[in-house]
Structure formats: structure tokens, C-alpha cells
Amino acid sequence: MARYFFDVHDSQVTTLDEYGAECADRAAVADEALRVLCEIAGDWPQRHLHHGLRVTVRDGSGHIVHAASIQLSAQWLDEDRPATTPSTRTSGIAA
């Protein structure tokens, strides 16, 4: 197995992986890159909302061999509708 380093780049900072991870093959490298992205985005989603989050992977000689990224976005889809409150009407069920 070879050691790969997963560097994280967001809109504010780049964090270089000093330790790396052993990966058996290319599929394992790609899986680890996606796992890292999801873990980081999941820990603090608001920081990454509407900003790209990217991982570049270096091999043992320092060459970038893989890159993966995600873009988080969220929006309300009912902004043009007036706010309503739940109805206090009964649904016809007898008490």
C-alpha cells in the first residue's frame, strides 16, 4: 500500500495533510477523498454553504494525483408564498 496525503481547501484556508493515509489502490484514494469532504462539510455545514470545498491528494513524492470537490447550497423554495399558521379547524373526526 502507498501513502497519500489529503489536503483540504475551503474559501478561507488550506490545510495540508501531514500524516496521510495508506490506500491500497486508486479506488481507495477516491473513496477516502470523498469521505474527507463529507466529514468536513458535515462538521460545520454553514461554513461551507455556497462556498466550494475541495480535497487534493498528493502521492508520496508530492505530486497531486487526484482532486474531489463539493458545493453545498440551500434555498427556501416557497419565498413567494405568504407565511401561514397551522389551521385550528377540526378534520371532521368526532371526539
Image: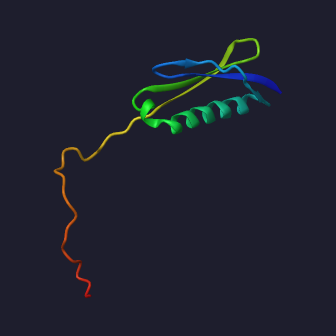
Q: Residue 84 at what x, y percent from top left?
A: 18, 57
Position in image of residue 65 (x %, y %): 68, 18
Residue placed at 44% from the left, 31% from the top?
Answer: 47
Res 34 → quadrant: top right
Does 21 appear above or below 86?
above
Q: Quadrant of the C terminus?
A: bottom left
Residue 33: name its quadrant.
top right
The residue sitting at the right extreme is 1
Q: Is residue 94 shown above or below 33?
A: below
Say above or below: 86 vs 83. Answer: below
Residue 15 position in % (x across, y down): 58, 20
Q: Is residue 39 left or right of residue 23?
A: left
> Most extreme residue toward the left, as rendered?
82
Left or right of 33, for residue 43: left
Q: In which quadrant is the N terminus drawn? A: top right
* Left or right placement of residue 10 versus residue 55 in this view: left
Q: Residue at x 21, y 77 (%)?
A: 90
Residue sitting at 37 percent across and 39 percent down? 74
